[in-house]
Amino acid sequence: MQRKVRLALAWILVATLLSYVIFLYYGLGHAPGGIATQWWHPSTFLLEWPGVGDWVATPWLGVLALTLPATGISIGIFLTTRSALVRALALSCTFTTIGFAAYGIASPMPWRFFHWRWSLVIVLGGTAMGWASASPVLAARWLERGFRAGLVVYLPVSLATAAIIRGTTGTDESLAFSFSPWPAFPVLGLESGAYGIAGILLGLAAGTALMARGLERPGLALAGSLSAIALPWIWIGWRFGALQPRSGAALALLSSLLLCGALLTRDGERLTILRRRALHLACGAALVALPLFAGHALATGDYATNRFYRSGLLIDALQRFIEEHDTYPPKLEELVEQGFLEEVPRPRVGFSFLEHLGLAAPQEFHYSEFGSGYHLEFSSTEWIQCTYSGSYVYPEDEDEEEEEEVYDDDGEDYAPWNCLKDHPSLWKIEARDEGEEADGA
């Protein structure tokens, strides 16, 4: 009877938390044109309330104040039920609340510009980070119920995650999963948010395993504390670059607090409990990281194949064509008609079976011809539009051209490609731009 009461209370708390998330959506979101004309349009009415509008000047305080109720309800859910699914739902709602508060008060521009698309980005991002945070609990249930039963649920989710990372771009609306003009969900929700959470879980796993023997060996306790702080730093820094001092301090504080929570145990064999908990944390980190690495690796492979092989076939055929005809073809199909290619290659973005199922439009190279020059473009994941600028040098101009300096992709006055050799990412471009600005200064 007591178990049924606790379960009913947990679902009441979940309903309350969902209601609070919807309340923040309507109260902080931005409608198209600033006017709510449909029932599902938000109206920003919360920003008109006394005191709430003042948080615009101190957004961190507003985000904290609006997140605290969701955090309190989530804690109540965790204390009331041991259901992994309910706990994952609670964490998802909490992260979504943080997103609504942050983009409603601190940074409203994306919401004003993208409207419902940004609402969907926040919800999906919160869901991804919520389930990533609950992965140790989900992993514990998986290990209890058996490997095969867990795969039935995990494989579709991991495949969808890898497909989103591999097939989402902000430069081609025809691609599957491109529900926003800029691929914010894969970049922010998966490759930043969920990836960072996996690193924190990895540090907690190492810290918990070492701290389990800390009472007997103080050196292991110290190593566990350092591991819980250092591993997330290394994990995140390896992907995004060195953390700023303030961000690094916040990450260290968060890792320390979470490690203290992971070390709390009830009556029982402490060593056994902490070892089991470390296993669940490590397994959860692996379950989160595997589809992220797989999707990123596949996207990187697609990019390399498109840039160096598939486009190379076209570039070589175009070079042979102009040497024979003194001009580039108006369409790529002429390369096939005149025997320079067996077929026009197409760039690969995402899983090909989605195209066969009609869930994604077939990709093509975009070709523009202008006399003795041309542009060849293809879309890639994230926000990349890669362009090759070809220009034919006629024999009578070769002597003059030989006197000029020619640069390749590594350091160029002129480079045919506008994109990097390796797969560009948002943080790579930012780092390069910052370096160029420093050189210019």
Image: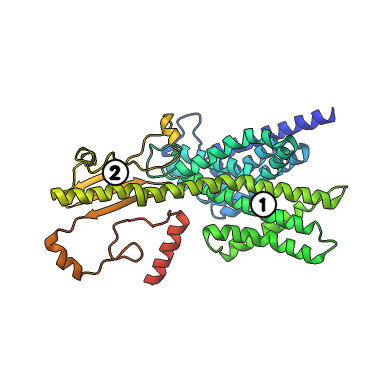
Q: Nearer the viewer, residue 70 or 378?
A: 378
Residue depicted at 69% across the width and 50% down the height? 282
Residue depicted at 17% across the width and 59% down the height? 393
The residue wearing badge 1 is 201
User: Is 3 situated above or below 234?
Assistant: above
User: Is 397 situated above or below 103?
Assistant: below
Q: Nearer the viewer, residue 430 or 277?
A: 277
Return the x and y of residue 392 as percentages of the image width and height: 19, 56
The residue wearing badge 2 is 366
Q: Is residue 332 left or right of residue 238?
A: left
Residue depicted at 45% across the width and 31% down the height? 37
State how far apart marks 1 and 2 are (Cα): 43 Å
Residue 357's disc is none
Tell me the amino acid under the disc marked 2: His
Q: How many marks on residues?
A: 2
Return the x and y of residue 170 as percentages of the image width and height: 41, 44
Return the x and y of residue 338 as percentages of the image width and height: 19, 40
Quadrant the C terminus occupies: bottom left
Q: Secondary structure at mark 1?
A: helix
Instruction: Count neighbours of disc 2 (C-alpha within 10 A) and say few if under 14, some if 14 to 19, many if 20 or more.
Output: some
Q: Nearer the viewer, residue 394 or 201?
A: 394
Q: Is residue 133 left or right of residue 170?
A: right
Q: Nearer the viewer, residue 85 or 90?
A: 85
Quadrant the N terminus occupies: top right
Tell me the amino acid under the disc marked 1: Leu
